[in-house]
């Protein structure tokens, strides 16, 4: 076992790290979400194509945005695509309508969310140690939806700052989002540790600016065959104390006495 890290700040990914978002795989969930959007628009007496065409058109637009995100790490959002979709079918959209479309889209996702059993306890342990806690998340959803979730699962109070790609404009692994996170934490990147479940975004991203990282390794993920064996990894958040010094001073003294 390598020597334990002694950071001044811990920065977390959100989805599949703190909160479970993938009980239903995204490719299965997305068409269902768009059908809910279609229902919402029809209730408003807005003439749209049938469900199959509507979903196909939406997915085609998403493909364009995804390429830009993949090539240049420029983030896109569901409301952004929804607005373009309506424009393509000659429907004038205002902010209220786009917001309503997003809420309809997100409702099935929201219903399937859950917080991991060890999330709150781990964050509490870190907070008691006096460390800064941050969150950096790639997301195509508005920041407001995620802030709502943090409150819903009673973990919002643990975070000193949150940073979402949908607001920031760039997504992990772009170095700028990690530089911003370190600035928000108030420490050098080397004094922070990032924890996430994806290799490219959550390991190579922070390490590119000298920020140590820990991989929460999941069975549902495919990881590169040439991924370095030296990477620090955990299977659940409760294993973080194996890599980070999170024992409080009182506990340390008691341990020494024993």
Image (spheres, grey):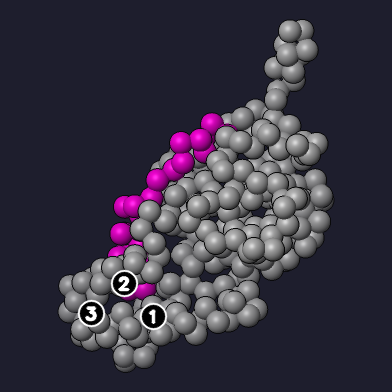
Q: Which residue is mark 2?
A: 31
Q: Residue, x 68% and y 34% (percent of image)?
A: 242
Q: Secondary structure at mark 2?
A: helix
Range covered by the magenta-colored residues: 97-123
Q: Residue, x 64% and y 60% (percent of image)?
A: 199
Would you call the spot at circle 2 few (<14 residues within 10 Å), some (14-19), or many (20 or more)?
Answer: some
Q: Residue, x 67% and y 33% (percent of image)?
A: 241
Q: Which residue is mark 1?
A: 59
**Where in the figure is residue 168, as x and y percent of width and height?**
61, 66
**Where in the figure is residue 61, as x and y percent of width and height?**
43, 84
Q: Are marks 1 and 2 in contact (CB under 8 Å)?
A: yes
Image quadrant where residue 240 sits: top right
Q: Residue furthest top?
A: 257
Residue 9 shows in the view: yes
Image quadrant where residue 208 sits: bottom right
Q: Is residue 92 left or right of residue 133?
A: left
Reply above or below: 30 against 231. below
Reply above or below: 114 against 172. above
Would you call the spot at circle 3 few (<14 residues within 10 Å), some (14-19), or many (20 or more)?
Answer: some
């Amino acid at each position: 076992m390598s020597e334990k890290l002694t950071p001044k700040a811990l920065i977390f990914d959100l989805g599949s790290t703190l909160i479970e978002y993938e009980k239903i795989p995204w490719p299965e969930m997305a068409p269902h979400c768009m059908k809910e959007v279609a229902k919402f628009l029809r209730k408003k007496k807005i003439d749209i194509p049938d469900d199959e065409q509507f979903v196909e058109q939406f997915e085609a637009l998403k493909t364009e945005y995804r390429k830009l995100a993949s090539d240049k790490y420029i983030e896109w959002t569901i409301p952004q695509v929804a607005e373009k979709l309506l424009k393509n079918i000659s429907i004038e959209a205002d902010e209220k309508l786009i917001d309503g479309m997003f809420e309809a889209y997100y409702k099935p996702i929201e219903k399937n969310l859950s917080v991991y059993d060890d999330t709150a306890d781990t964050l509490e342990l870190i907070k008691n140690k006096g460390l800064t806690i941050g969150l950096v998340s790639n997301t195509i959803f508005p920041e407001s939806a995620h802030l709502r979730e943090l409150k819903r699962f009673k973990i919002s109070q643990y975070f000193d700052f949150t940073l979402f790609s949908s607001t920031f404009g760039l997504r992990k692994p772009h170095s700028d989002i990690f530089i911003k996170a370190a600035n928000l934490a108030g420490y050098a990147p080397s004094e922070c540790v990032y924890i996430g479940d994806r290799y490219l975004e959550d390991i190579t991203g922070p390490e590119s600016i000298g920020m140590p990282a820990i991989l929460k390794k999941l069975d549902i993920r495919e990881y590169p065959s040439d991924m370095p064996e030296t990477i620090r990894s955990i299977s659940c958040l409760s294993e973080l104390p194996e890599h980070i010094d999170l024992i409080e001073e009182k506990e340390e003294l008691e341990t020494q006495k024993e």
